[in-house]
């Protein structure tokens, strides 16, 4: 966590002076008197905040490594931080400490924009929208820190610059007493954002992808669902938010499951869209690299896939419960012998490199289908940043429907929960539940519908492990205490060869799970530099 003190801010908010966020001695003061004098400066300031989210050490790749501690993915390649998958957390693993720092940068930049625009006289319509975007982005970043580092025993450092008279005094942000305090401030920021932002439908085509009212409401629902880990009355708020999205904002399910991952621009903004990273692919390498990260290493000699983050046999078996030819499975996972199109050629899937898994994530691979996918801009021409054209989902309405179903189940209303679960199943041409839903149904549906997405399956398991519902608690405990399995084929390049199912060969020393592992410890450097202002939670002291 770093104290990034904004220096002389020009068109892209470049920094001339910065220091660690918890340093007790700041290294400079803001020089911002000539900024926010026109609309373009407000746009530039906000776009600078957006720009980092797709990068490698955030949603491009690094935030996904920690999912190796659940049972849906394996890494495909040995990494230098096996502790992320074995619950032997130190807090200093680069894949979590780097994102920790980046989220705090986004919070600081958002603070800067809010502070400068909030009380500006004669604020323009663009500046008002930018103020709403800053509130949303501060809440979004705060949420990603809070739920991964905070509990009922301690929250995370956070300060609102607008609470200071005059300029922010560069003091060390206070650590919230509990994560519920963080969730309360996140909700307050999302409410503020809604008061300044337009509806999505009010944006022109050039501005689609910016923060909007429905995205705020979606993250309110998710924040309340996480808050319900500690206060079950918050499930009422989850239902209220999702109902409002459905009834007042017209959110619903896309016509087909695959529409959410299509390279077709015409399918970017379906009713299911809540919040995404719009990815263009093409020569400008726009978007997130995760599709190329999940592609077979070297792409069978055709494209520079990276061979990282692969499905486990466990998630395949879970999805198989809906039938061997079910649409959601075939659209999400490639299995040996499964036919698919790749650069205009029909292939039978097999894996020829990296640590064995027997599977590949297929959810994000549709852009690679045509022979001219690079020439037409569907796939990046730079294999070192292998992005594709896709409106990469961070939140879609199906996830929120499953939160609402979970809320109903926690209130003992399995019949209402079944309505949401069945709507999702019918959309994917799966057999609907025949009666009231159970927590086992919710577990299965959330795990399969949202597989390989940034919905944080690992944290689902962690919050369920603390649930008062014995059924979901037992399901979470079983997965958290299991080691992922994969398929080992006798002839890796022969889809017809025999295979065995066994434990994944990497990170083999996973600890038995306990609730101390619900969070990551704060990076040790930040604790040391804080001179006591930042304290590890009791479980990590």
Image (cartoon, grey):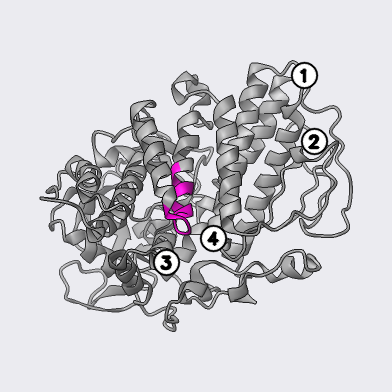
**In the image, which is nearer the foreground, mark 3 or mark 1?**
3
Q: Which residue is mark 3?
A: 466
Q: Earlier in the sequence, mark 1 or mark 4?
A: 1
Q: Which residue is mark 4?
A: 148
**Residue at figure coordinates x 43%, y 62% from the top left:** 463
Q: Is residue 36 above or below residue 102?
A: above
Residue 224 magenta-highlighted: yes
**In the image, which is nearer the foreground, mark 1 or mark 2?**
1
Q: Nearer the viewer, residue 345 or 77?
A: 77
**In the image, which is nearer the foreground, mark 3 or mark 2?**
3
**In the image, which is nearer the foreground, mark 3 or mark 4?**
3
Q: Disc 3, disc 1: CB below 8 Å?
A: no
Q: Position of residue 28 (x, y in %)?
A: 89, 48
Q: Secondary structure at mark 1?
A: loop
Q: Nearer the viewer, residue 70 or 217?
A: 217
Q: Which residue is mark 2?
A: 9
Q: Is residue 470 visible?
A: yes
Q: Disc 1, disc 2: CB below 8 Å?
A: no
């Amino acid at each position: 966590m770093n104290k990034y003190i904004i220096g002389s801010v020009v068109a892209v908010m470049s920094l001339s002076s910065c220091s660690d966020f918890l340093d007790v001695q700041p290294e400079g003061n803001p020089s911002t008197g000539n900024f926010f004098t026109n609309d373009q400066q407000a746009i530039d300031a906000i776009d600078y905040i957006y720009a980092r989210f797709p990068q490698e050490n955030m949603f491009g790749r690094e935030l996904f490594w920690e999912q190796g501690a659940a049972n849906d993915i394996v890494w495909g390649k040995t990494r230098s931080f096996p502790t992320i998958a074995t619950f032997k957390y130190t807090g200093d693993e680069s894949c979590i400490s780097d994102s920790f720092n980046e989220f705090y940068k986004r919070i600081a930049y958002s603070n800067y924009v809010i502070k400068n625009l909030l009380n500006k006289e004669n604020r323009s319509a663009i500046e008002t929208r930018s103020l709403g975007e800053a509130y949303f982005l501060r809440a979004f970043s705060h949420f990603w820190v809070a739920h991964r580092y905070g509990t009922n025993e301690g929250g995370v450092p956070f300060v609102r610059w607008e609470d200071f008279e005059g300029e922010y005094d560069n003091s060390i942000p206070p650590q919230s007493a509990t994560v519920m305090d963080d969730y309360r401030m996140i909700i307050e920021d999302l409410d503020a954002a809604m008061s300044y932002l337009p509806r999505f439908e009010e944006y022109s085509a050039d501005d689609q992808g910016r923060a909007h009212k429905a995205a705020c409401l979606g993250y309110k629902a998710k924040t309340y669902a996480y808050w319900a880990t500690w206060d079950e009355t918050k499930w009422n708020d989850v239902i209220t938010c999702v109902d409002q999205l459905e009834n007042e904002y017209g959110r619903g399910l896309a016509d087909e499951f695959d529409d959410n991952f299509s390279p077709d621009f015409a399918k970017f903004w379906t009713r299911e869209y809540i919040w995404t990273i719009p990815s263009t692919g093409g020569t400008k390498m726009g978007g997130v690299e995760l599709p190329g990260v999940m592609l077979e290493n070297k792409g069978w000699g055709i494209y520079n896939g990276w061979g990282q983050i692969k499905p486990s046999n466990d998630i395949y078996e879970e999805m198989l419960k809906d039938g061997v030819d079910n649409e959601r499975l075939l659209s999400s996972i490639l299995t040996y012998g499964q036919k698919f199109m790749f650069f205009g050629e029909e292939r039978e899937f097999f894996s020829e490199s990296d640590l064995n898994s027997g599977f590949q994530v297929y959810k994000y691979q549709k852009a690679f289908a045509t022979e001219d996918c690079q020439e037409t801009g569907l796939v990046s021409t730079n294999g070192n940043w292998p992005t594709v054209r896709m409106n990469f989902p961070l939140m879609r309405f199906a996830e929120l429907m499953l939160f609402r179903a979970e809320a109903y189940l926690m209130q003992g209303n399995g019949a209402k929960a079944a309505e949401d679960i069945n709507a999702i199943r019918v959309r994917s041409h799966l057999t609907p539940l025949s009666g009231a839903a159970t927590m086992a149904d919710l577990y299965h549906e959330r795990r399969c519908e949202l597989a390989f997405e940034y919905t944080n399956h690992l944290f689902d398991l962690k919050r369920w492990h603390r649930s008062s519902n014995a059924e979901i608690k037992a399901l979470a405990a079983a997965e958290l205490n299991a080691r992922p399995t994969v398929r080992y084929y006798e002839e890796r390049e022969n889809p017809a060869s025999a295979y065995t199912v066994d434990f994944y060969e990497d990170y083999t020393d996973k600890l038995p799970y306990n609730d101390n592992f619900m969070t990551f410890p704060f990076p040790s450097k930040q604790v040391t530099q804080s001179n006591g202002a930042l304290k590890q939670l009791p479980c990590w002291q």
